Amino acid sequence: MSGPTFAIVNPASGGGRTGRNWPEIQKKLEAAVGEVTPLFTDGPATPHHLPAANLARDAADKGANLIIAVGGDGTINETINGLFHDVSDGQAPAPLGLLNTGTGGDFRKTFDLPADLDACIERLSSGNSQTIDIGRLTFNADDNEPMARHFNNIASFGMSGAVDRAVNKARFSKLFGGSFTYLWATLSTALRYRPQAVRIRTESGWDDVINVGTAAVANGRFFGGGMMMAPDATPDDGAFDLVIMRDTSVGDLFKDSGSLYDGTHIENEKVIVTRTRWVEAEPVDTAPVLLDIDGEAPGKLPARFDILPSALTLRC
């Protein structure tokens, strides 16, 4: 007999629309997949407290047949961290479904999942699934405490970490949607940001100090509200695509911002692209190099990124 279906719901996502619309969303979900037990997050995530992760862990412990993350990319990431709380190298204990109701919606784009809620629920009802890789990251929190997190989409460092903090503080720009919010935060952050020297190592033996604008360790293709940071990334191939933008200036971003959305930035001579199963990165100077993990900003370098092959079943 199949187990229960749980929905991990972030009522604050999408500017609070998820919470206001949940009764209607639940009716549509249950018409598609059967009875759904909602579990609501109780506040924003912090480096030491991931509300959706705690709920996902509880749902898995109750024998969940399916766990649906209802919110933005941050909610998806938290839910996955809950599923992998007691997993080192094996598979997550339950499949994951996605219902994006947040600001960015980057992870779903790799799988061509629709933005329309009804169409997304229809995809969930089909029962189709695929197995994907997951990233594991060890790093330092802002208070220098060692931390470990999992990520499903893209973890990055450099200007992207500073952009995350700007996005999370944004109020007015979010009225114009996720893509505008991320683009505005990127361009405004670039006015203050200066590339930082980082030592980067990979499994091939590559070991170099690079003046990093943004470096992305990519399992999925999109981040930053629709930017196609890693156009060739495949989330089931057992490796990351490492994309490094060197010496990125404000002028580069204004001139080439369009190429970030169609993936052609990787043709620029300032961009390095390689594939690897692990990455190590450490700052050369004393200034903190900030991290981005699936749209959240939990800490800083030094960090190590490892791939966990075929670790999660995604219902999509």
Image: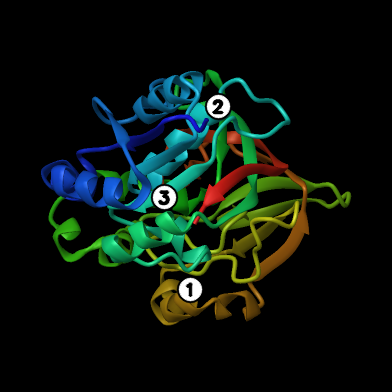
In this figure, which residue is indicated by the disc labeled 2? 140
Q: Residues within 10 Å of mark 2 (few under 14, many from 20)?
A: some
Callout 3–callout 1 Cβ contact below 8 Å: no
Residue at x-position 48% and y-position 73%: 260
Label whose residue precedes the other's in the sequence (3 or 2): 3
Q: CA distance from mark 3 to mark 2?
A: 29 Å
**Percent from the top left, x then y, of residue 294?**
47, 47
x then y, percent, for residue 143: 45, 20
Whole-number angstrom distance, CA of label 3 to CA of label 1: 25 Å
Q: Secondary structure at mark 1?
A: helix
Q: Amino acid at mark 3?
A: Leu
Q: Between tags 3 and 2, which lies in front?
A: 3
- Label 3 belongs to which residue? 98
> Tag 2, which secondary structure?
strand
Q: Earlier in the sequence, mark 1 or mark 2?
A: 2
Which residue corresponds to mark 1? 260
Mark yes or no: residue 193 visible: yes
Rendered view: 76 above or below 208 = above
Dot 3, crowdedness within 10 Å: few (<14), some or many (≥20)? many
Disc 1 packing (10 Å; few <14; some 14–19; many ≥20): many
In the rendered view, does 27 fall on the left or right side of 71?
left
Q: Where is residue 193 drawn, in percent x and y? A: 42, 54
Q: For residue 129, what is the image quadrant?
A: bottom right
Q: Give the residue type at disc 2.
A: Asn
The quarter of the picture where residue 119 lies is bottom left
